[in-house]
Amino acid sequence: MRIEKNLFLIGVPIFVPIALVYGWLTEWSEWVGFLGILLVGGLAGMIGFYLAFTGKRVGQRPEDRLDAEIHEGSGEQGHFSPWSWWPLVLGLSAATGFLGIAIGFWILYIGMGLAVIALVGWVFEYSRGYHAH
């Protein structure tokens, strides 16, 4: 995870000075842009720190070594459920929630209800039914 860590940690010394220059150029009158750029730098730092911490715990992957062969990265990469419809329902409920913020808050409550149902369905998808393990 060395490459990913470096990609995110390089964002901290880039975004923090850019935020300060932006604040100085706007004479500190426009706070949303300054804080937004500063928070992007902070988020890049947090993700980079997490990847560095996880990289020390997991060790080197074949992607991190220059002498690695293609076959070293083969095999199980994780557990995915390609037949699951719950991510689609969760995405539609998030879109409904954002629509509710734009149009009316009563639509937001419908989106929140659908999001709760979608999250519960996605989390407990393998606990019961046809694909239970």
Image (cartoon, helix red, strand yellow):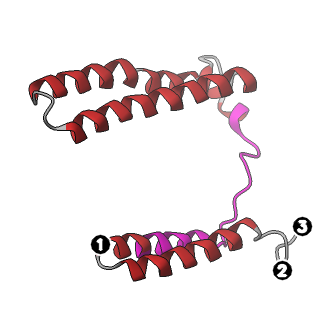
**Is residue 87 inside the magenta stretch?**
yes
Mark seen at residue 9: none
**Quarter of the image with the C terminus in it:** bottom right
Disc 1 target residue: 102
Magenta stretch: give its range. Answer: 72-96
Q: Secondary structure at mark 1?
A: helix
As drawn, 37 above or below 57: below
Q: Report the residue at 84% width, 70% height from top.
A: 127
Q: CA distance from mark 3 to mark 2?
A: 9 Å
Callout 2: few (<14), some (14-19), or many (20+) C-alpha neighbours within 10 Å? few
Disc 2 marks a residue whose amino acid type is Gly
Disc 2 target residue: 129
Task: Please indicate whether residue 71 sits to the left or right of residue 116 in the image.
Answer: right
As drawn, 11 above or below 73: above
Q: Report the residue at 30% width, 38% height from top.
A: 36
Q: Report the residue at 76% width, 43% height from top.
A: 75
Q: Secondary structure at mark 3?
A: loop
Q: Mark 2 vs mark 1: which is more N-terminal?
A: 1
Q: Image quarter for residue 32?
A: top left
Mark seen at residue 133: 3
In the depicted view, which residue is nearer to us: 126 or 76?
126
